[in-house]
Image (cartoon, rainbow, N blue to C red):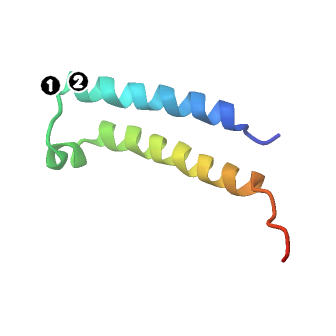
């Protein structure tokens, strides 16, 4: 069974919310240099990137072939 776009979008929204909550817990919007060295933030960022990548390939898989001219 393949993952549908709706499932991936739901998981992406959840992961993004968790990432924003983590940033808020660190005290607002910390600078990127601080975030890069935080292992928890890097893990959350990797999950968000994974879901974005899955969306890209779902779109690629579902793309209709172009008619030949």
- How crowded is the residue under tag 2: few (<14 C-alpha within 10 Å), some, or many (20+)? few
Asked whether the residues under the numbered discs 1 and 2 touch, taking CB atoms below 8 Å apart as contact, a structural biologist would say yes
x and y, in percent, of residue 5 in the image: 68, 38
The residue lying at 22 percent from left, 43 percent from top is 35
The residue lying at 62 percent from left, 36 percent from top is 8
Residue under circle 2? 24
Comparing 68 with 46, the one in front is 68
Comparing 62 with 34, the one in front is 62
x and y, in percent, of residue 18 in the image: 39, 26
Q: Farthest front residue?
A: 69
Query: Dot 2 lies on which element?
Result: helix
Residue under circle 1? 27
Between the residue at mark 1 and the residue at mark 2, the CA separation in whole angstroms equals 5 Å
Q: Is residue 36 left or right of residue 17?
A: left
The residue lying at 38 percent from left, 43 percent from top is 45
Q: Is residue 25 left or right of residue 53?
A: left
């Amino acid at each position: 069974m393949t993952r549908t776009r709706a499932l991936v979008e739901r998981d992406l929204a959840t992961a993004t919310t968790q990432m924003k909550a983590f940033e808020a817990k660190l005290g607002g919007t910390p600078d990127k240099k601080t975030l890069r060295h935080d292992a928890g933030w890097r893990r959350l960022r990797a999950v968000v990137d994974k879901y974005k990548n899955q969306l890209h390939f779902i779109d690629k898989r579902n793309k209709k072939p172009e008619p030949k001219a």
